[in-house]
Amino acid sequence: MLGGIKAAFPFTIPVFLGWIFVALTYGVLMNDIGYNAWWTMLFSAVCFCGSMQIAAIPMMAAGFDPAQMLLMSYLVNFRHSFYGIPLLEKYKDAGVLKPFLVYTLSDEQFSLSVSAQKPDNVENKYFYFGINLICFCYWIGLTGLGGVIGGLITFDTTGLDFALTAMFVVLFMQQWKQKENRPACVIGIGVTLLCRIFFGTSVFLIPSLLGILLIFWIGRDKL
């Protein structure tokens, strides 16, 4: 297991760098609505889903509604259901580690799990466990640090939540650099734009994911 963590560490460095501003921003915003660093870290550990955590901030500020939060969480993180499909083979021998791998799977961990070249002398389950564990610790620690910073700063934090959008733009550009990934990028943008036009801003996410999945399933031998 220790060997898997060590082998995974270099692959997680870009995630750490990409998460710095997003996680710190989340901690600062949580402090703004009255949650200190300890509460922020607890929330990050229990609800490990960066985009939903940021989306939940105004909902929590307006008054906690469990039903609304549950529905919103499911819709925002619905894409995770699709992440599990290509990882069935990779996680099949994970044993007792599988629940943790499933729980800590996010956009960045998924990207690393399907693209990182595992060393031959490391077992699959320990390598993927290392990726998810390290990133999990990154997020909890950085959001806690953001909570500490939030208690020290005094300037207006309006607009800081754009850091999440910026992170996804960077991830997209990384995929675009590889020519073999560009058809997938174009399909993703095209389907999402069409669904945005036809379904509007509130419900376009799920039709987009279903449309992208259908296209990739039809063209699975070529894409």
Image: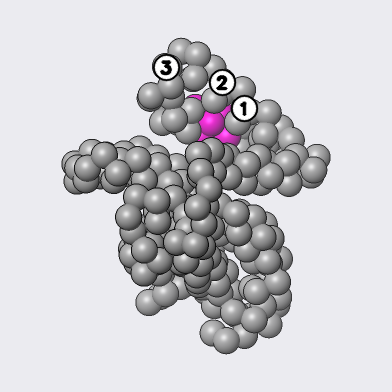
Q: Is residue 60 left or right of residue 163?
A: left
Q: Is residue 185 left or right of residue 212?
A: right
Amino acid found under the numbered disc labelled 2? Leu
Disc 1 and disc 2 in contact, CB within 8 angstroms:
yes
**Residues under numbered marks 1 and 3 in contact, where contact means CB atoms less than 8 Å apart:** no
Q: Which residue is mark 1?
A: 189
> Magenta region: which residues?
211-218
Q: Amino acid at mark 1?
A: Ile
Closer-to-camera residue (149/204): 149
The residue tagged 3 is: 199
The image position of residue 52, as x and y in percent, is 40, 46
Amino acid tagged 3:
Phe
Which comes sooner in the sequence, label 1 or label 3?
Answer: 1
Q: Quadrant of the C terminus?
A: top right
Is 113 in the magenta?
A: no
Q: Which residue is mark 2?
A: 193
Whether residue 132 appears in this view of the structure is no
Q: Quadrant of residue 38?
A: bottom left
